[in-house]
Amino acid sequence: MSVLLVLDLLLVVVVGGLWAAAWPLRSAKAGAAVLIAAVLATAARATVVALLGGAGWWFVPDRLVTAVPLTLLSGVVGVALVRRRTPPAPVLIAAAYVAVAGIAMQFLVGYPVTVGAVAAVFGPGVAALLVWRLPARAARVAVVATAAVALLAAGVTAAVGSRLPDRLDHNTHGADSGHAAHVGPGSAPGVSVADLRGPSRPPTRKFTLTARAATVTLPSGATVDAWTFDSQLPGPELRVTRGDVVEVTLRNELPGIGVTLHWHGYDVPAGEDGVAGVTQDAVPPGGTFTYRFEAKDVGSYWYHSHEMSSEAVRKGLYGTLVVTPDGTESAETDITLPVHRFDTGATMLGGSDRRETRDVPAGRRVRLRLVNTDNDAHRVAVGGTPYTVSAIDGRDLNGPTVLTAETTLRLPAGGRYDVVFTMPAGAVHVMVDGQDSDGLLLGAGAMPAHPAGTDLDITRYGTPAPGPFGRYNKDYTLVLDRLVRFLDGVPSYAYTVNGGVYPDIPPLMVDRGDAVRTTVVNRGTESHPMHLHGHHVLVLSRNGRPVTGSPLWLDTFDVLPGEVWQVAFRADNPGIWLDHCHNLPHAKQGMVLHVAYRGVTSPFAVGRHTPNHPE
Ligand code: C2O
Ligand code: CU
């Protein structure tokens, strides 16, 4: 599918170019060759569109609008060519117009296709036709002027409408986007996210994290000008026990930059979620904020700033959160391994950007907590021992089977895999992205081999178990794409959901107790690791094929180009929650929406006259 989507992107441009050239070149020497090429390219595109349609209706309506008429027109041209005649001029002109309109449909419209969009794309062509046929000069001028004014007005409206207001709050911003409905008829009087806080009883574990700028020297000797927690990369690991009441005080000593703490994958009460402008104001330089939550779930998680997150996380404002089952020091060697890449190009595994070695006695149980804190997926290989993936995204898998070095683990941005094995007599090597000179080497002996592997398909790993959902009372579809949109007034090749960009994507409205099913479709050519705050989703199917392995409860799932995922969650954690792509530059360029509980309001706001810029 990925190949088809890229091919289609290329073909739509090639087809547009060839038909646009065909009429001007018709009597030149190359004319016939261009015509033949145009007909063949059109046939190729028709085939690709048909194949895309096989993956689901979401992939084709915008393509069919122009591909069908263009295929018919090119059929006429093909017949003319076979008869060695020059194709009629109106056919060539129409083909050129429709082919170029195909480019517009691809980059401006996407899915869904609205009547307005079709009118905007074909309107100029109809206007041109009128101008050409109308006898009176005045009438022609009128048509041209009307078309020009209409297009200009549409453009200006879109640009102005995309400008972030000085202050955009989440309770009133436009009935059209649905945010007005946070407090709806029949719902309880509004509760503010600011009041949905963690337990007030005294904490059993207290931490302070101080955000500050620091030049950090990595183990290889390379330096990074970083934004850090406590001057270190990554930030301190917070390790607590199930049942703890955790209190974390955030202090901000960064110059001129706000900061927050978001507990990625930890389903805390909404007021502790740490999203600037949604659940709190960004903590200003010199300020503090205290988070408090109960450690109900064991597993591997991480934390990061959610103010200008696309910049802040990359620069170092991240760390890991580990919740263990009980207070006793377990018999495991337990190593947390966040994978992160800095702007300097340095890639860190855990706390090191070069090969680390560690002594582990043979026979000891080892748990590796792989955490991807980067924007891209990373491929991890474990050589030298059979192992199991015991948990993903902080949730234990049911009946995971033993894997060998021939299986690689593709860790999506934001995701976590727990790898468990018994230390063998020889060495074990953890390799990231095929770099066998780096990584983590456990034990003694020769470097183990890394045979070429295939990625673990998590939807077929482990043993099934009955799911908790009987039926679903809410059904949503999110179509992810890349389209030209105005972002805060600036035209951009943006990342869209259902054709819109943040903050104009209608929220998914839910009521407490809802069983919500969501279909996520990726029409683009890049993968989108989608992350829902405050909830784990149960994966139901991928590309129409149900999950046949262990139940998969994820907070971040990687939707590859052309994929269709169906997931479900129980609305059991009232709040206003972000749902976004965790390739954070994609989030910054539009791919963010909210899951909003009816009746929950937020006193916080994003916009130029606020301290808050969540992405
Ligand atoms: Cu890890 Cu909204 O983020
Ligand atoms: Cu993305």
Image (cartoon, rainbow, N blue to C red):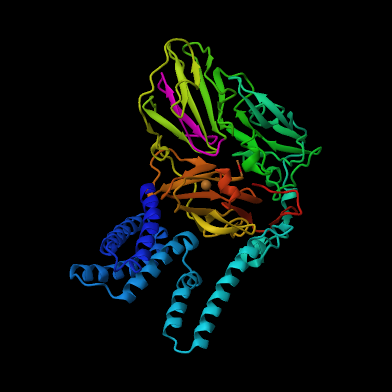
Horizontal arrangement in the rendering, residue 461 relative to residue 162 (left or right): left
Ligand 1, image quadrant it occupies:
top right
Q: Name the outermost residue toward the right.
A: 286
Q: Quadrant of residue 323?
A: top right
Q: Position of residue 201 (x, y in %)?
A: 77, 36
Horizontal arrangement in the rendering, residue 81 relative to residue 534 (left or right): left
Q: Report the front residue among 472 and 533.
A: 533
Q: Quadrant of residue 448?
A: top left
Question: What is the count of numbered marks?
Answer: 0
Residue 232's place in the image compared with 55, above or below, is above
Residue 530 among magenta residues: no
Q: Does residue 157 appear in this view?
A: yes
Residue 516's place in the image compared with 260, above or below, is below
Q: Report the front residue among 558 and 293.
A: 558
Q: Position of residue 80 (x, y in %)?
A: 22, 71
What segment is highlighted magenta in the picture?
Answer: 374-397
Residue 280's place in the image compared with 11, above or below, is above
Horizontal arrangement in the rendering, residue 81 relative to residue 201 (left or right): left
Q: Position of residue 612 (x, y in %)?
A: 72, 49
Q: Does residue 239 appear in this view?
A: no
Q: Name the outermost residue toward the left.
A: 83
Q: Report the front residue among 207 and 607.
A: 607
Task: Name the residue located 62 percent from the left edge and 67 percent from the top edge.
Answer: 156
Q: Report the front residue among 371 and 163.
A: 163
Task: Name the residue located 46 percent from the left edge and 66 percent from the top edge.
Answer: 113
Q: Position of residue 366 (x, y in %)?
A: 51, 20
Horizontal arrangement in the rendering, residue 513 relative to residue 481 (left or right): right
